[in-house]
Image (cartoon, helix red, strand yellow):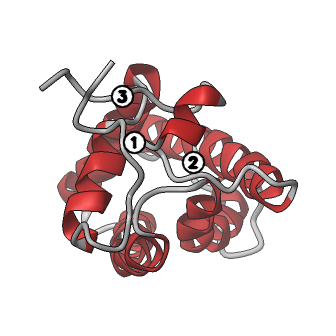
């Protein structure tokens, strides 16, 4: 089967093309999860005056340059790409302290602002799930799963899909 992603990402393919093909090969459930996380963080703009939302957005935007560096260095997405969410691990500690302890001032509660409190809870638990999945991915990369998504090796490992047929 000949598809636009079936070949290797050889050095003759520009990095931006290899990266796009790699992104395009992400499985649909993972892509839905990524869009969900992005939209979840964008909601922070509605609460920008609140410090937790500010730090949420700061950690979200800190990921951008890391995505660029990681994809450029690897010529696509690999399991090592889980490292891009490192700023979220720091944010999780901060948010956990704000939600579950009084260490940084009175813990945020539903009585303060139910919508904001609910959004922070969803951000905390969703980000925690994401970071745990990232840790698993990075461990798998160190264990030898070093393929780039969209390549035949990734497809053979059932880690990515191929693009549409040409």
86 vs 163, nearest the viewer: 163
Mark 3 residue element: loop
The relative height of residue 53 versus residue 108 in the rendered view (above or below) is below
Rendering coords of residue 11 (x, y %): 35, 73
In the displayed structure image, the side of residue 164 where residue 56 appears, left or right: right
Q: CA distance from mark 1 to mark 3?
A: 24 Å
Q: Are marks 2 and 1 in contact (CB under 8 Å)?
A: yes
For label 3, the crowd category at 10 Å Cα-Cα, with few meaning under 14, some 14 to 19 and many 20 or more, is many
Question: In the image, what residue occupies the spot 37% across and 22% down?
Answer: 28
Please indicate, yes or no, whether residue 115 appears anywhere in the rendered image. Answer: no
Which residue is under mark 1?
Answer: 37
In the displayed structure image, the side of residue 122 where residue 89 appears, left or right: right
Q: Are marks 1 and 3 in contact (CB under 8 Å)?
A: no
Please indicate, yes or no, whether residue 102 appears anywhere in the rendered image. Answer: yes
Which residue is under mark 3?
Answer: 162
Mark 1 or mark 3, earlier in chain: 1
Rendering coords of residue 80 (x, y %): 64, 63
Mark 2 or mark 3, earlier in chain: 2
Mark 2 residue element: helix
């Amino acid at each position: 089967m000949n598809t636009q992603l079936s070949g290797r990402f050889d050095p003759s393919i520009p990095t931006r093309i290899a990266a796009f093909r790699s992104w395009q090969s992400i499985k649909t459930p993972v892509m839905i999860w990524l869009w969900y996380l992005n939209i979840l963080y964008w909601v922070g703009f509605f609460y920008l005056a609140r410090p937790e939302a500010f730090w949420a957005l700061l950690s979200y935007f800190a990921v951008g340059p890391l995505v660029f560096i990681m994809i450029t260095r690897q010529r696509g997405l690999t399991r090592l790409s889980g490292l891009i969410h490192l700023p979220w691990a720091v944010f999780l500690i901060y948010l956990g302290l704000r939600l579950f302890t009084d260490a940084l001032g009175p813990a945020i509660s539903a009585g303060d602002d139910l919508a904001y409190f609910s959004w922070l809870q969803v951000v905390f638990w969703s980000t925690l799930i994401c970071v745990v999945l990232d840790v698993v991915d990075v461990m798998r990369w160190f264990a030898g799963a070093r393929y780039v998504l969209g390549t035949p090796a990734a497809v053979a490992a059932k880690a990515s899909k191929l693009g549409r047929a040409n």
